Image (spheres, grey):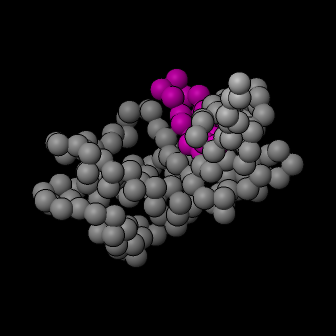
Amino acid sequence: MKAFRYRCFPNEAQQQMLQKTFGCCRFVWNQLLARNQQQTSVNLIILNNQLNELKANKNYKWLYEISAVPLQQVTIKLNRTFSILVKAPKFKSKHNRKNSFIVTGKAAYRFKENNLYLPKDKEPLAINWTRRLPCKPSSYIIKQTRDGKYWISFVCKEYIPALTN
Protein backbone atom coordinates (compact mmCIF):
# COMPACT_ATOMS: atom_id res chain seq x y z
CA MET A 1 0.00 0.00 0.00
CA LYS A 2 1.12 3.51 -0.73
CA ALA A 3 -0.27 6.93 0.13
CA PHE A 4 -0.42 9.86 -2.29
CA ARG A 5 -0.79 13.30 -0.73
CA TYR A 6 -2.24 16.36 -2.46
CA ARG A 7 -3.26 19.86 -1.48
CA CYS A 8 -6.99 20.44 -1.83
CA PHE A 9 -9.04 23.60 -1.97
CA PRO A 10 -12.61 23.08 -0.74
CA ASN A 11 -15.17 25.74 -1.57
CA GLU A 12 -17.06 27.47 1.25
CA ALA A 13 -19.87 24.88 1.43
CA GLN A 14 -17.33 22.04 1.40
CA GLN A 15 -15.32 23.72 4.16
CA GLN A 16 -18.47 23.88 6.29
CA MET A 17 -19.16 20.18 5.65
CA LEU A 18 -15.55 19.30 6.46
CA GLN A 19 -15.72 21.28 9.69
CA LYS A 20 -18.96 19.50 10.62
CA THR A 21 -17.33 16.16 9.90
CA PHE A 22 -14.24 17.03 11.97
CA GLY A 23 -16.52 18.14 14.83
CA CYS A 24 -18.77 15.07 14.68
CA CYS A 25 -15.78 12.73 14.63
CA ARG A 26 -14.23 14.54 17.60
CA PHE A 27 -17.58 14.43 19.46
CA VAL A 28 -18.02 10.68 18.84
CA TRP A 29 -14.41 9.98 19.87
CA ASN A 30 -14.82 11.91 23.14
CA GLN A 31 -18.25 10.41 23.92
CA LEU A 32 -17.11 6.82 23.32
CA LEU A 33 -13.87 7.42 25.21
CA ALA A 34 -15.79 8.83 28.21
CA ARG A 35 -18.14 5.83 28.22
CA ASN A 36 -15.30 3.31 28.10
CA GLN A 37 -12.50 4.93 30.06
CA GLN A 38 -12.97 2.71 33.10
CA GLN A 39 -13.73 -0.49 31.16
CA THR A 40 -11.29 -3.38 31.27
CA SER A 41 -12.47 -4.80 27.96
CA VAL A 42 -13.63 -2.82 24.94
CA ASN A 43 -14.18 -4.23 21.50
CA LEU A 44 -15.45 -3.01 18.15
CA ILE A 45 -18.94 -4.47 18.65
CA ILE A 46 -19.39 -2.52 21.90
CA LEU A 47 -18.13 0.69 20.29
CA ASN A 48 -20.37 0.29 17.24
CA ASN A 49 -23.39 -0.33 19.48
CA GLN A 50 -22.55 2.80 21.45
CA LEU A 51 -22.22 4.78 18.20
CA ASN A 52 -25.69 3.57 17.19
CA GLU A 53 -27.02 4.65 20.61
CA LEU A 54 -25.53 8.12 20.12
CA LYS A 55 -27.07 8.42 16.66
CA ALA A 56 -30.44 7.26 17.98
CA ASN A 57 -30.41 9.95 20.68
CA LYS A 58 -32.77 12.75 19.60
CA ASN A 59 -30.33 15.35 20.98
CA TYR A 60 -27.67 14.23 18.49
CA LYS A 61 -29.69 14.09 15.26
CA TRP A 62 -27.06 16.39 13.70
CA LEU A 63 -24.77 13.34 13.46
CA TYR A 64 -26.86 12.37 10.41
CA GLU A 65 -25.79 15.55 8.57
CA ILE A 66 -22.48 13.93 7.65
CA SER A 67 -21.55 10.61 6.09
CA ALA A 68 -21.67 7.62 8.46
CA VAL A 69 -18.33 6.26 7.19
CA PRO A 70 -16.02 8.68 9.07
CA LEU A 71 -17.95 7.99 12.30
CA GLN A 72 -17.54 4.24 11.80
CA GLN A 73 -13.84 4.81 11.24
CA VAL A 74 -13.69 6.59 14.62
CA THR A 75 -14.88 3.41 16.34
CA ILE A 76 -12.28 1.35 14.47
CA LYS A 77 -9.48 3.78 15.37
CA LEU A 78 -10.58 4.00 19.02
CA ASN A 79 -10.77 0.21 19.26
CA ARG A 80 -7.26 -0.07 17.83
CA THR A 81 -6.03 2.60 20.24
CA PHE A 82 -7.54 0.81 23.25
CA SER A 83 -5.92 -2.47 22.22
CA ILE A 84 -2.45 -0.99 21.61
CA LEU A 85 -1.97 1.51 24.42
CA VAL A 86 -1.09 0.68 27.97
CA LYS A 87 -2.59 3.96 29.19
CA ALA A 88 -5.96 5.37 28.19
CA PRO A 89 -6.32 7.38 24.96
CA LYS A 90 -6.66 11.15 25.22
CA PHE A 91 -9.71 13.29 24.59
CA LYS A 92 -9.64 15.41 21.45
CA SER A 93 -9.69 19.17 21.83
CA LYS A 94 -11.78 21.53 19.73
CA HIS A 95 -8.94 24.03 19.79
CA ASN A 96 -6.25 21.70 18.46
CA ARG A 97 -6.76 22.93 14.86
CA LYS A 98 -5.21 19.73 13.55
CA ASN A 99 -8.24 17.85 12.30
CA SER A 100 -8.64 14.74 10.19
CA PHE A 101 -11.05 11.99 9.23
CA ILE A 102 -10.91 8.81 7.17
CA VAL A 103 -13.25 7.64 4.42
CA THR A 104 -12.98 4.02 3.30
CA GLY A 105 -14.89 1.82 0.93
CA LYS A 106 -15.42 2.49 -2.73
CA ALA A 107 -19.13 3.05 -2.16
CA ALA A 108 -18.49 5.90 0.30
CA TYR A 109 -17.10 8.28 -2.32
CA ARG A 110 -17.01 8.60 -6.06
CA PHE A 111 -14.65 9.59 -8.80
CA LYS A 112 -16.13 10.96 -12.01
CA GLU A 113 -13.95 12.25 -14.83
CA ASN A 114 -10.92 12.48 -12.49
CA ASN A 115 -12.91 14.49 -9.95
CA LEU A 116 -13.48 13.40 -6.37
CA TYR A 117 -16.92 14.01 -4.89
CA LEU A 118 -17.06 14.01 -1.11
CA PRO A 119 -19.91 12.10 0.56
CA LYS A 120 -23.16 14.11 0.55
CA ASP A 121 -21.67 16.72 -1.84
CA LYS A 122 -22.63 17.53 -5.44
CA GLU A 123 -19.57 19.63 -6.31
CA PRO A 124 -16.16 18.07 -6.96
CA LEU A 125 -13.36 18.84 -4.54
CA ALA A 126 -10.64 20.99 -6.10
CA ILE A 127 -7.39 19.03 -5.80
CA ASN A 128 -3.94 20.04 -7.00
CA TRP A 129 -3.11 16.81 -8.85
CA THR A 130 0.68 16.75 -8.92
CA ARG A 131 0.76 13.13 -10.13
CA ARG A 132 -1.69 10.48 -11.23
CA LEU A 133 -3.00 7.83 -8.93
CA PRO A 134 -1.89 4.34 -10.04
CA CYS A 135 -5.32 2.88 -9.29
CA LYS A 136 -8.62 3.67 -7.62
CA PRO A 137 -7.87 4.34 -3.94
CA SER A 138 -9.15 2.08 -1.18
CA SER A 139 -9.51 5.04 1.21
CA TYR A 140 -8.59 8.64 1.77
CA ILE A 141 -7.82 10.90 4.69
CA ILE A 142 -8.65 14.60 4.75
CA LYS A 143 -6.60 16.73 7.10
CA GLN A 144 -6.65 20.36 8.06
CA THR A 145 -3.36 21.63 9.38
CA ARG A 146 -2.97 24.25 12.07
CA ASP A 147 -2.43 26.95 9.44
CA GLY A 148 -5.87 26.15 7.94
CA LYS A 149 -4.67 24.33 4.80
CA TYR A 150 -6.47 21.22 3.63
CA TRP A 151 -4.68 18.08 2.44
CA ILE A 152 -5.98 14.80 1.10
CA SER A 153 -4.07 11.52 1.16
CA PHE A 154 -5.24 8.62 -0.98
CA VAL A 155 -4.28 5.08 0.01
CA CYS A 156 -3.73 2.85 -3.01
CA LYS A 157 -2.98 -0.83 -3.18
CA GLU A 158 -0.27 -0.28 -5.74
CA TYR A 159 1.02 -3.22 -7.71
CA ILE A 160 4.82 -3.23 -7.88
CA PRO A 161 6.18 -5.83 -10.30
CA ALA A 162 8.99 -8.05 -9.06
CA LEU A 163 12.49 -7.30 -10.35
CA THR A 164 13.97 -9.93 -12.62
CA ASN A 165 17.66 -10.61 -13.25
User: Can residue 16 be seen here?
Assistant: no
The secondary structure making up most of the magenta span is strand
Q: Residue at x 26, y 45 (%)?
A: 84
32 left or right of 156 in image:
left
The N terminus, quarter of image: top right
Percent x, y for residue 127?
Answer: 74, 35
Q: In which quarter of the image is the C terminus?
A: top right
Q: In this view, does 26 lie to the left or right of 149?
A: left
**Residue 28 occupies quadrant:** bottom left
Q: Which residue lies furthest to the right in this view?
A: 113
Q: Which of 2 and 107 is in front in this view?
A: 2
Horizontal relation, residue 162 to residue 98: left or right: right
Q: Which quadrant of the figure has residue 125? A: top right
> Where's residue 126, x and y in %?
75, 38
| Label tally | 0
Q: Residue at x 17, y 42 (%)?
A: 86
Whether residue 60 appears in this view of the structure is yes
The residue drawn where x is 60% and y is 58% is: 105
- The x, y position of residue 160, in whole percent, is 68, 36
Q: Tell which of 144 and 84 is nearer to you.
A: 84
- Residue 130 % position (x, y): 76, 26
Specify whether residue 143 is painted magenta: yes
Q: Residue at x 53, y 60 (%)?
A: 69
Identify the magenta region: 140-156
Tell whether 51 sits left or right of 69: left
139 or 99: which is nearer to us?
Answer: 139
Q: Which residue lies furthest to the front in this view?
A: 165
Q: Is 23 covered by the magenta stretch? A: no
Q: Is residue 94 above or below residue 40?
A: above
